[in-house]
Image: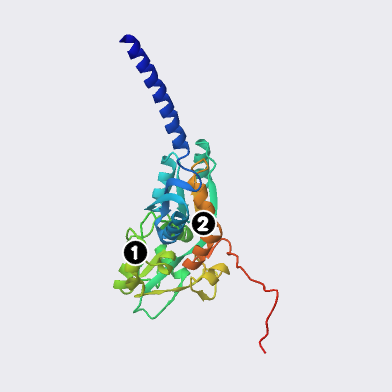
Amino acid sequence: MRKFNKGFVLVFVCFSFVMCNKKEQQNTRKESILKGSATVMVDETLLPIIEDQVAVFEGSYNAKIKLVSKSESEIIVSLFNEKSGIAVLSRNLTEDENKIFAQKKIAPKITKFATDAIAFISNKSNKDTLVDLKDVMEFMQGKSSKIKGLVFDNPNSSTVRYMKTLAGIESIPQKGVYSFKTNEEVIKFVAQNEGMIGVLGLNWLTQPMPEMQQYVDQVNVLSVKGLAGQNYYEPSQNNIAEGKYPLARDLYIINGQGYSGLGMGFASFVAGDIGQRIVLKSGLLPAKVPGRKINIRNEINNDK
């Protein structure tokens, strides 16, 4: 009986060892650049374009990407708390942020994939569709201004950070400034209230959710005069491409996985031909203009 028990235990241990090794091998193969699952943290102001990219990517490969929409500040905190992480931001990493990655012995892969813009909107009843950026800056600095009030999304958002940096202030003023949680709430508030100027990511206007279309139809997208400019420009693809619109910003995929996983594959896809066509169709400016196929015929048949 004891011999049987010893033999049984030996077989069981060997079987367990083999199964554990097999399981480890399966886990190492669980994720590659084009298969498996991963979580991507997305700046809330950029969610529509990334949702489109993920839909096509998942339809093309055996991959599942979970999108988590957060403010810029929340994403930065999460990016460093995670063992590995992928994020979509409207700015590159700072020197201090790169040092944190270096301490973790990870060299993040940075992929620029588009240029977005911060847009100003007003209620449709407002016949003036022009705004001077100087007036907006003076209002944010607490000076006398033509601006009656501003509506922002999350106080920790990339939009607020961008505008504070431009105005040279540490915090937005308390008087005449409203803050919500999302860009959708900004659009709804401006659509339902006269006299306010909403500040949000352009992507929410070029690619509104179906349920948001009625609110987008009730607002004007304002043309902006830059701090050193003389003319007013709307946030169109052409004006962004030509450097005329004063509130453009580059978009990046930050891949801090530290290995060849879905972060690498997804970034390559977004920066590739198909991904750049999706950006172009969205109304934003792709980092690389997608190529066009031209068919050249050897013979031309002339009808007589």
Does 172 sit left or right of 266 as displayed? Answer: left
Q: Give the image location of residue 106, x and y in percent.
A: 52, 39
Q: Mark 2 sits on what residue?
A: 270
Discs 1/2, front:
2
Q: Earlier along the polypeptide chain: callout 1 or callout 2?
A: 1
Asked if 170 appears above or below 122 in the picture, the reply is above
Asked if 260 appears above or below 152 in the picture, the reply is above
Q: Mark 1 sits on what residue?
A: 184
Name the foreground residue: 4 vs 279.
4
Query: The residue tagged with tag 1: helix, strand or loop?
Result: helix
**Image quarter (top left, top right, bottom left or bottom right) of the N terminus:** top left
Q: Residue furthest top?
A: 2
**Neighbours of disc 1 within 10 Å: few (<14), some (14-19), many (20+):** some
Q: Amino acid at mark 2?
A: Val
Asked if 136 appears above or below 96 in the picture, the reply is below
Q: Amino acid at mark 1?
A: Glu
Name the foreground residue: 255 vs 139.
255
Q: Give the image location of residue 296, x and y in percent.
A: 67, 72
Distance (Cα) linking label 1 and label 2? 25 Å
Q: Residue at coordinates 49% horizontally, 40% vertically from top-left?
A: 100
**Image quarter (top left, top right, bottom left or bottom right) of the C terminus:** bottom right
Query: The residue tagged with tag 2: helix, strand or loop?
Result: helix
